[in-house]
Image (spheres, rainbow, N blue to C red):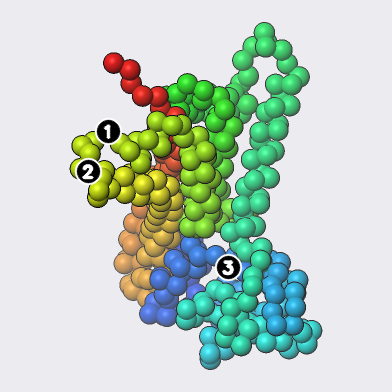
Amino acid sequence: MNCKLKRLLCLALLLLTMIPAARAEDFSAKEVVLEHIKDSHEWHITDLGEGRDPLVIPLPVIVKSSTGWHVFCSSRFEHHADASGLRHVKADAPADLQGLAIATEGENAGKIVENGSPVLDFSITKTVAVMFINVILLLCIVLGCARWYKKRKASDAAPGGFVGFIEMLVMYVVDEIIKPGVGKGYEKYTPYLLTCFFFIFTCNVMGLIPFPPGSGNVTGNIAVTFFLALCTFIIVQFSGNKHYWKDIFWPDVPTWLKCPAPIIPIIEFVGIFTKPFALMIRLFANMMAGHAIAVAITCIIFLVASQAVAVQLSMSALSVLMSIFMMCLECLVCFIQAMVFTMLSAVFIGLARVEPAHE
């Protein structure tokens, strides 16, 4: 038997040994996928079996309830929900915390509620915690490279290794994306666009790591992509020149399309908001779908757990191969999505600063 095939079968057997003794019909792929892509008040690592509490990393909870502001750890909540779908605060918690619970189903699923109603929540959730880790990692990389350059002169040889890779990436983004997209005066927007690229790229790559400090679905969270798109929207509007606003409210089209029925100006005005909306949805949908597909393919192993050994081995091997393919594809998508967001942001800024053509 081929050596590579042996290794693949061994990996499949190893995965099969990790499957709990429960029947395949007790396994819900939908719950596994949703649990991976949604936000939560704790960092779930793994389940330890029936009747045992799951292994999780508790996170800070900051809420305002009817009894005032509270700051405590998410370990105060029960690990399992009751019949009403609520994870109540443990009995030994302070009296002012009693009444708080995490809803696991319904319209408030995943939120902290008090007597069935959501409370004002500023908690450090899993997405926020992962984002902080990604930002710290990115700062360490950037400041480390800056320190390397600070100790050397411009006449010294070009850097190699990791610093050289970062320099190559920066020069590629500036020369091939920012400069052509923004045009003249691109230097003013380079810090923001480089920040967007490296933040998105770092979050995407860290999201591929299946264990802490990775596994966070940061760019697959629409709140994060909304904020990034909002930043681009604000910069574009404040960068717009007279020609940009003229093309929106009084474009060079026949007068009857502008007055008395301002058809074209209305379309152009709506376009101001559709551009950042496209930025937000494009990044969110692509990253969320990639995570969901990768987890769903892995679930094939558990769905065939109760089948014959031959079916288990063949389907597990297929799942491993498809998972490896998806992870390789996701590595490419991580770079492409960061590049596309930066490129479109640069193009939108450039269009807002374009000068009228002189005949």
Marks 3 and 2 sit apart, C-alpha to C-alpha, by 50 Å
Is residue 280 in view from this perspective? yes
Furthest residue to the top?
155
Residue at (35% x, 50% y) in the render: 270
Q: Where is residue 94 in the image (x, y as percent from the top left)?
A: 79, 84
x 20%, y 43%: residue: 256
Q: Position of residue 96 (x, y in %)?
A: 77, 84
Question: Where residue 331 sits in the image (x, y, percent)?
Answer: 45, 43
Name the residue nearer the viewer: 251 or 205: 251
Residue bearing mark 1: 252
Query: Of 132 and 113, which appears nearest the observer?
Result: 113
Q: What element carries label 2?
A: helix
Mark positioned earlier in the residue sequence (3 or 2): 3
Q: Mark 3 points at which residue?
A: 40
**Comes first in the chain, label 3 or label 1:** 3
| Residue under the image location 41 percent in, 65 percent down | 299
Q: Quadrant of residue 136?
A: top right
Q: In this view, does 177 lie to the left or right of 98?
A: left
Local packing at callout 2 (Cα closer than 10 Å; few below 14, some 14-19, many 20+) is: some
Q: Mark 2 points at which residue?
A: 257
As displayed, is residue 245 above or below residue 37?
above
Residue 90 location (% of width, % of height)? 71, 85
Three-letter code, disc 1 = Asp
Residue that appears at 44% across and 41% down? 341
Residue 69 found in image quarter = bottom right
Query: Disc 3 on helix, strand or loop?
Result: loop
Dot 1: element: loop
Extreme residue in the front direction: 260
Viewer-side label of 3, 1? 1
